[in-house]
Image: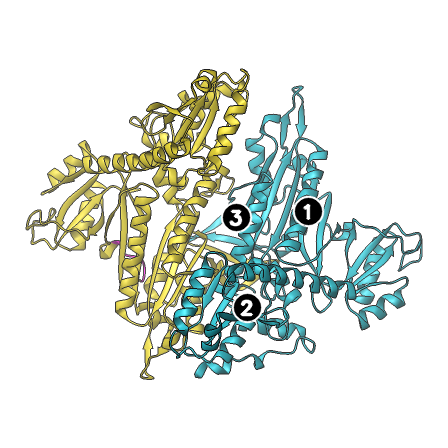
Chain colours: A cyan, B yellow
Amino acid sequence: MANDKKMVSAITDMEKDFPQWYTDVVKKAELADYSSVKGCMIIQPYGYAIWELLKNQLDEKFKETGHENVYMPLFIPETLLQKEKDHVEGFAPEVAWVTQGGNNKLQERLVVRPTSETLFCDHYKNIIHSYRDLPKLYNQWCNVVRWEKTTRPFLRTTEFLWQEGHTAHATAEESYEETIRMLNVYADFCQDILAIPVIKGEKTEKERFAGAKNTYTIESLMHDGKALQSGTSHNFDDIFSKAFEIQYTDKDNKLQYVHQTSWGTTTRLVGAVIMVHGDNNGLVLPPKIAPVQVIVVPVNMQKEGVIEKATEITERLKKVVRVKNDFSDKSPGWKFSEYEMKGVPVRLEIGPKDIEKGQCVLVRRDNNEKIFVSLDNLEETILKLLDDVQLNIYNKALENRERRTSVAKNMDEFSNILDTNQGFIKAMWCGEKECEDKIKELTAATSRCIPFEQEELSDNCVCCGKKAKHMVIWGRAY
Amino acid sequence: MANDKKMVSAITDMEKDFPQWYTDVVKKAELADYSSVKGCMIIQPYGYAIWELLKNQLDEKFKETGHENVYMPLFIPETLLQKEKDHVEGFAPEVAWVTQGGNNKLQERLVVRPTSETLFCDHYKNIIHSYRDLPKLYNQWCNVVRWEKTTRPFLRTTEFLWQEGHTAHATAEESYEETIRMLNVYADFCQDILAIPVIKGEKTEKERFAGAKNTYTIESLMHDGKALQSGTSHNFDDIFSKAFEIQYTDKDNKLQYVHQTSWGTTTRLVGAVIMVHGDNNGLVLPPKIAPVQVIVVPVNMQKEGVIEKATEITERLKKVVRVKNDFSDKSPGWKFSEYEMKGVPVRLEIGPKDIEKGQCVLVRRDNNEKIFVSLDNLEETILKLLDDVQLNIYNKALENRERRTSVAKNMDEFSNILDTNQGFIKAMWCGEKECEDKIKELTAATSRCIPFEQEELSDNCVCCGKKAKHMVIWGRAY
């Protein structure tokens, strides 16, 4: 069997070379491929199926919280991008420029959207007139482009897929509430659906979104102890509405500026799933976003009745889970490796002896546990098992994060931790950009967030020793 | 009530000025808005909800026929686009060019994809090696850009949303079968879901997709008698695989070229729905893609128990249909107009007298029929009514098409028909491009397709009088 050479042995040990392990998994689980276009990836069927499941479940949460989907243009005229000063300064260095349409040079250059605040503002200015028009709770699923220097599939690509929510409200209170509401939607989604624990907090001024009043973030920790910003929610207050003159008439017939938010998550969440849950046998998928939750593999399938029974079981299970079977002529061993690589949460094996006993074998991807179960109530057994897997991989991820979370009271401790137990570092901070810069220079760690759950570790900034204002979570990040 | 000025009176009579009527409906039903970006539209929540319902149902059909979704890059390097000669000639004059990334001029210009044949070919070359890798049945949902001179929301925009299927097969037979299979998927979808009857046929060489061996099409007729190409399916045979050298080893260990197809439908289908079913009160939506299938409007809602009953009915109906209620302080008359404009298939009115009698009023959008029905079995009544509406608007559209389909045996008849009863014209054709060009020049009508269902109207070409080869459907098109 020619395909047997695809066996698992070829993948790099994650403890030896995590970046190479990541690339191997992306490639061998057939999640994404490189393209002829620098920095752009091809999302292959299996990777895209994960993204679709993720997207559909997140979209449901948006709709439950009253949001509506829209679609804005791909292009932004240069003058429109320039309307908000900080925003254009933040994005102009990393955008793609369209300068020619058909055979003609354009009179005004167009930016391929890196994000769409300016387009939403332009539209809101046209459609918001009265307090009756508020709030506007819009979201869009689309592609965006940022001209990145170094790229890696899912984690950082020149083009990526994302959703961007853009809302407009009557008051500052409402825009603040919305910002936090959506941060919580993201946090719950990561925890409940992706089985990834996150820390919620505010970004420092240095790390804030270009043009925002406040940026909030959810931060997660990868298996190797590096941090990943997994979703952000920005409160613009009236900064953009003043630049774009988006005003409404309130109940007292007075003109007021609207208050806005935006929030986004991207295909990088697929990267997070790989790096949080994966192991040396490949991908480990949370059942809730696994395109195949159960793979049925017949053993001794040439024996009479085996394929029939495996088919019957597949049909039964189709009603309650995403299930597939593999009756190809490859060996069971090859199939076991293949579906382990692809992170299928549960493997169901069935052979002549099992059929005789009215049972089958279930093997969990997350801990390799093998159990023999009765074919009666198989649906219930499997649904319960999938819940267990979902919970267990969340707990494992949480354990890893806790094991890799340390406290540093001075810069020696700070550096030492990064050398010995890379992960999140809790340390006090005076609030000055100078210290933030210095820490980055010395350790390559950045402030991930000022977490909502503050602790008083000491009175002094870990860097300058002056009076501390906040506890900050630090880490080296993707 | 300030909003009362939005009443229906403002919309243009469709029989007097159909293009203006179309624009009015798009605007007043809040389907799309113009943007600051020339030729690009903003799809508003209601328009996008229609697109989502359409997309989800079409995507289901693709998956049922074994197709998988993927995502390819937005950009195509210039050299890649140039690999297939006819293809680049067809598309180069109408593409947007990215020439700068960040602060640097690009060494090679990038095209914003107008379609993705070249990207799929490039990928297929990398992943197809053996007959075991075939067929590849891929599809993607994405945005594409074509630098159009004149644009109109949904029908023709510089950027539009679409799906593009791209498949690779072992043999010419298989790629031909796939091309026809997907044309049939489109035709059934238009008829069953969008309630739009279509004619299936092949495009003439002149109207063929750039680089295809054969192009097949579904053609529909709008209310005003103009044609709309509503979906196309292309058989490439081995034209692209030779240009891109996509080869596989067959069972006899011989190298063979793959055989390919592509097929696409776009947001223009939303335009078709507007123009086929709409009337002078606005949009008329087929229930299967109506974001709101039933709108509950209370009458005398200040009276005790009315809102409660209307709420109770809404909750009951939520289990079986997409239903909303409107308890705003606007007048029932305003609400009636508003939901007529938005094409909601069924309006449910309920007032104190109805409650007394245990009934409610149902008003159909398609024919304005008003019926009093018992609140018992309301779910069944409404489901049946929605089926009736779906069927009735299909029949109306078919009737319009039949009334507007004529036979022409010479060019005088041809021109006369277009002046008096614009629509589809069936006429014989010799097969020469000269006649096709001449007909277009004389009448502004183009060959829509050589329909699969041929009739022998006469032996002679409608234009030159020489021996006819095919019956062709002609029409002026959007």
Q: Is residue B366 visible?
A: yes
Q: Quadrant of the C terminus of chain B?
A: top left
Q: Quadrant of residue B175?
A: bottom left
The residue indicated by pointer 1 is A184
Q: Residue at x 47, y 18 (%)?
A: B299
Residue situated in front as seen by the camera: A457 or B171: A457
Which region of the structure is painted magenta?
B207-211
Give the Cα distance between marks 1 and 2: 39 Å
The residue indicated by pointer 3 is A75
Of the numbered discs 3 and 1, the one sitting upstream in the chain is 3
Local packing at callout 1 (Cα closer than 10 Å; few below 14, some 14-19, many 20+) is some
The residue indicated by pointer 2 is A373
State yes or no: discs 1 and 2 in contact (Cβ < 8 Å): no
Of the numbered discs 1 and 2, the one sitting upstream in the chain is 1
Circle 2 chain: A
Q: Quadrant of the N terminus of chain B?
A: top right
Q: Quadrant of residue B136?
A: bottom left
Q: Position of residue A418 (x, y in %)?
A: 80, 69
Which secondary structure, mark 3? strand
Determine whether, in the image, residue B218 is placed left or right of residue A175: left
Give the Cα distance between marks 2 and 3: 56 Å
Callout 3 amino acid = Phe
Which secondary structure, mark 1? helix
Callout 1 amino acid = Asn
